[in-house]
């Protein structure tokens, strides 16, 4: 049954006693989700040190510039495809938050080799380095793309279909490797299947920018965006603070039942692209109008998450819904622009 927030435990902080004042490695920490997570970790008194490993391919130094004066912060310029760099970055680390990846379904279709190399080989390097350096737990960014051609709604963690893109294949393989490393080497893992995360520090530029920053950029510039298809495709858009909440809970949970699990991280609500553009038009007061193009290859028509498992075991709430999240995102893009 989909979750009913009124009848499930509320969010609460947990502490792993042996991990008081822990050292955390965030791969991809200069990226969109990673840099938001780093900010939360640096503000948490349970954290002694946050080390970021990022090759700055899709992340940016300006996302983490403000953290440099913080004595708890360390930055390493390195690539997760370089095993020696990953192993060195894992030295003295208690928990890894693995956010580094090469995103975008269209990019993976255009260049499956690089997507495979970064997302599969890079993630395997993270797990193997964790074993060699004695890291206790790896929390990693999984993806709703894993549900593939499964048509059932809402999406439930143990019911997936066939992947529809090279990107989806890589994110599913990450989950398989996590399970194998638990069974074979005793590494704890928690996989977070993100559903269309958006918010501050998400880049609106480039060929593979996500839909919400693209819509905001178009609205602020007064230029109508192109919607792929007729606009009825829908997504469970998830504000970045919800993804950060899930990561913090996963990093610090001491509940055995919560570990070695995969979770949907979303809001359990669905918005189609036409509705999304209308929301953004209302927020920005733009007079621009959309045009429609062909459907994108590899796209699924609808996505909606059941988050009852994450709520029950991790005490995840996904409290920031679409209206509030879009307003917060607009504040960021309007200031940046």
Image (spheres, helix red, strand yellow):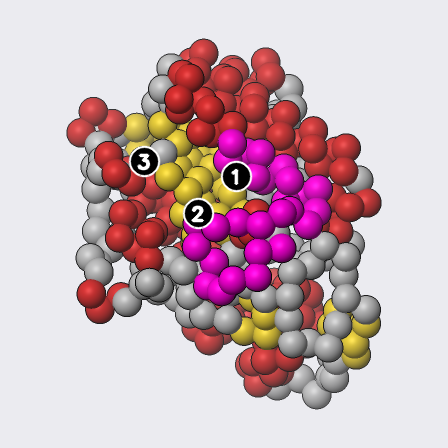
Q: Badge 1 local density, few (<14 within 10 Å), some, or many (20+)?
A: many
The alpha-carbon separation of the residues under discs 1 and 3 comes to 18 Å
Q: Is residue 309 among the parts visible in the rendering?
A: yes
- N-terminal label among 1 and 3: 1
- Position of the C terminus, as image quadrant, is bottom right
Residue at 43 percent across and 55 percent down: it is 156
Can you tell which of label 1 and label 3 is closer to the viewer? 3
| Separation of marks 2 and 3 at Cα, in angstroms | 16 Å
At 33% across and 57% down in the image, what residue appears? Answer: 308
Residue shown at 37%/49% (left/top)?
A: 246
Residue 73 appears in view: no
Q: Is residue 226 left or right of residue 144?
A: right
Q: Secondary structure at mark 3?
A: loop
Rendered location of residue 191, percent (x, y):
44, 40
Q: Which disc, if any, is residue 237? A: none
Q: Earlier in the sequence, mark 1 or mark 2?
A: 1
Mark 2 or 3, nearer chain start: 2
Quadrant location of the N terminus?
Answer: bottom left
Image x and y of residue 315, in percent: 27, 52
Residue numbers of the magenta segment: 149-176
* Label 3 Cα crowd, 10 Å radius (few <14 / some 14-19 / many 20+): some
**Mark number for residue 158?**
2
Q: Residues within 10 Å of mark 2 (few under 14, many from 20)?
A: few
What main secondary structure does the magenta stretch of the protein show?
loop
Tell me: residue 62, above or below residue 130: below
Give the mark toward the camera: 2 or 3: 2
């Amino acid at each position: 049954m989909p979750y009913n927030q009124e009848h499930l435990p509320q969010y609460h902080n947990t502490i792993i006693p042996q991990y008081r004042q822990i050292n955390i490695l965030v791969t991809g920490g200069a990226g969109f989700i990673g840099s938001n997570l780093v900010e939360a970790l640096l503000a948490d008194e349970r954290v002694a040190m946050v080390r970021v490993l990022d090759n700055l391919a899709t992340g940016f130094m300006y996302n983490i510039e403000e953290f440099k004066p913080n004595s708890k912060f360390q930055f390493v310029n390195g690539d997760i495809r370089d095993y020696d760099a990953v192993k060195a970055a894992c030295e003295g680390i208690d928990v890894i938050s693995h956010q580094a990846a090469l995103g975008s379904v269209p990019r993976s279709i255009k260049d499956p080799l690089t997507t495979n190399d970064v997302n599969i080989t890079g993630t395997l390097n993270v797990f193997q380095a964790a074993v060699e350096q004695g890291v206790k737990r790896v929390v990693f960014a999984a993806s709703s793309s894993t549900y593939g051609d499964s048509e059932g709604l809402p999406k439930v963690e143990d019911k997936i279909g066939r992947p529809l893109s090279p990107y989806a294949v890589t994110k599913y393989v990450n989950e398989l490797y996590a399970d194998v490393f638990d069974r074979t080497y005793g590494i704890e893992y928690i996989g977070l299947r993100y559903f269309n995360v958006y918010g501050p520090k998400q880049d609106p530029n480039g060929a593979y920018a996500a839909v919400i920053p693209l819509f905001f950029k178009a609205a602020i510039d007064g230029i109508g965006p192109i919607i792929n298809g007729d606009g009825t495709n829908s997504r469970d858009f998830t504000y970045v603070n919800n993804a950060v909440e899930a990561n913090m809970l996963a990093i610090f949970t001491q509940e055995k039942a919560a570990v070695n699990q995969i979770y949907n991280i979303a809001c359990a609500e669905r918005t189609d692209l036409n509705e999304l553009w209308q929301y953004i038009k209302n927020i920005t007061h733009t007079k621009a109008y959309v045009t429609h193009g062909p459907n994108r290859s590899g796209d699924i028509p609808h996505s909606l998450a059941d988050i009852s498992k994450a709520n029950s075991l991790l005490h995840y709430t996904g409290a920031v819904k679409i209206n509030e999240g879009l307003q917060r995102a607009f504040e960021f893009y309007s200031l940046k622009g």
